[in-house]
Image (cartoon, rainbow, N blue to C red):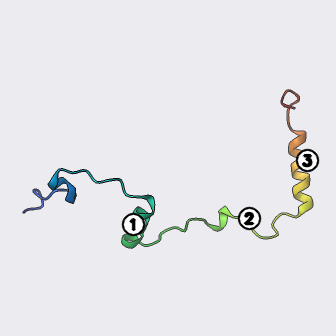
Amino acid sequence: MTDEQRPESPDEESGETAAPEPDWVRRRRLAAVFGDVLPEATRDDQAEPGSEPAGEKQRSEEWLRRQVPPHHG
């Protein structure tokens, strides 16, 4: 069988359609071929320990509450 005659997937030969593969199976297959290119979460996604003092967070929340327009309160 030449490359032009070869079916694109094994199920095409029998005429059956394959069930969609679960997301974890797809990720594992892609990782096996390409490696783990990017981690699930990067340092940018996570707050650094001790990055915002408790008092600063409270001031930030108070400022946000004061910014609410009167018709939303």
Q: What residue type is labelled 1?
A: Leu
Residue name at image x 28 percent, y 54 percent: 18
Distance from the alpha carbon under mark 2 to that under mark 1: 29 Å
Disc 3 designates what residue?
A: 62
Viewer-proximal residue, 7 or 34?
7
Q: Which amino acid does label 3 sit on?
A: Glu
Distance from the alpha carbon under mark 2 to that under mark 3: 20 Å
Residue 29 sits in quarter = bottom left
Q: Residue 51 in the image: state x and y as whole percent.
A: 81, 66
First in sequence: mark 2 vs mark 1: 1
Residue name at image x 42 percent, y 70 percent: 31
Instruction: Identify the secondary structure beneath mark 1.
Output: helix
Tag shown at residue 47: 2
Above or below, 50 relative to 6: below
Residue name at image x 85 percent, y 26 percent: 71
Instruction: Identify the secondary structure beneath mark 2.
Output: loop
The C terminus - image quarter: top right
Instruction: Identify the secondary structure beneath mark 3.
Output: helix
Residue name at image x 21 percent, y 56 percent: 11
First in sequence: mark 2 vs mark 3: 2
Tag shown at residue 22: none
Q: How crowded is mark 2: few (under 14 residues within 10 Å), some or many (20 or more)?
A: few
Q: Residue 1 in the image: state x and y as whole percent.
A: 7, 63
Q: Residue 34 in the image: state x and y as whole percent.
A: 39, 70
First in sequence: mark 1 vs mark 3: 1
Q: Which dot, 2 or 1, sits closer to the camera? A: 1
